[in-house]
Image (tube, coloured by chain):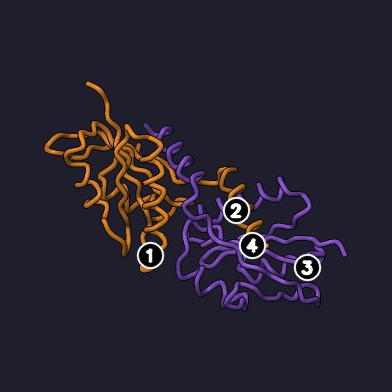
Chain colours: A orange, B purple
Amino acid sequence: MTEKLGILAIGHGSKLPYNKEVVTQIADYIAQNHTDVVVRAGFMENSEPTLNEAIAAFSGTGVTKVAAVPVFLASGVHITKDIPNILNLDENGCGTLMVDGTEVPICYAGPLGADKLIADLVYKRVEEAI
Amino acid sequence: MTEKLGILAIGHGSKLPYNKEVVTQIADYIAQNHTDVVVRAGFMENSEPTLNEAIAAFSGTGVTKVAAVPVFLASGVHITKDIPNILNLDENGCGTLMVDGTEVPICYAGPLGADKLIADLVYKRVEEAI
């Protein structure tokens, strides 16, 4: 069977629109660059769709495995506790989702972290401002 | 007079250590790549140094202007209201700081935002997990 990857891009969410806009745009960029992948975005607080709504939106796509990736700069309580609880992940960040009545494996990716790409982008924002 | 740039890298802060670790590492990368620039990190919540402590740490460095850059993925209340209030920025994101008794101009940079570099990094985190 050919594998088909789904990406669950998880945003923090906010009462203001910006977090959802940024996370959704990032999800769109990934989908544009990887047309064989099904990308869905879901949020932890205040913004919609929720994580469970985003998972439901894999229905009919034929995904055979899902990577859940927090689109967060750094780890925190949502990443260490809340997301693993909602997704029923084990200590290794592994679990299963039900998609169209079939169990699909899900694995948990890390947040952005202190990558040098981020440092370059922060410096670019500085150059734009000075 | 030769200009000397200071960068005030502003992190969200957290009760957990991760946000401070990531923002501090990013600030260190910027300092390593731009040895003519003075980089200080400060935090909005729970982590130290605070913004005002970070500003005080420009003392003795000879900075002649400062760029305040939120090391946040997306804008939100800290960025639209709290940081401009603390830094006394005007509607255009401009203001002045006192450093060693001298007024130094400060300008406000944008957060990371939905840059394609971020999308590539999110996909890299997915590849590491699957």
Would you identify the image quadrant in which residue B129 lies?
A: top left
Please state which amino acid type lies under the numbered disc 4: Ala
Q: Tell me the mark number nearer the camera, choosing from 4 and 3.
A: 4
Question: Residue B56 placed where, x, y %?
Answer: 72, 70
Q: Are marks 3 and 1 on the same chain?
A: no
Please state which amino acid type lies under the numbered disc 3: Ser
- Please tell me whether residue A18 is drawn above or below residue A1 in the rendered image: below
Q: At x 45% / y 44%, what residue is drawn?
A: B119
Would you identify the image quadrant in which residue B64 lies?
A: bottom right
Q: Chain of mark 1?
A: A
Q: Tell me the mark number nearer the camera, choosing from 3 and 1.
A: 1
Q: Chain of mark 3?
A: B
Q: At x 39% / y 53%, what residue is drawn?
A: A23
- Please tell me whether residue A72 is drawn above or below residue A95 in the rendered image: below
> Between disc 1 and disc 4, whose residue precedes?
1
Question: Residue B100 placed where, x, y %?
Answer: 80, 73
Kindly identify which residue carries mark 1: A17
Tell me the number on the disc at residue B106. none
Q: Secondary structure at mark 1?
A: loop
> Between disc 2 and disc 4, whose residue precedes?
2
Kindly identify which residue carries mark 3: B59
Kindly identify which residue carries mark 4: A129
Question: Residue A71 placed where, x, y %?
Answer: 41, 49
- Quadrant occupied by the N terminus of chain A: top left
Would you identify the image quadrant in which residue A89 lies?
A: top left
Q: Tell me the mark number nearer the camera, choosing from 2 and 4.
A: 4
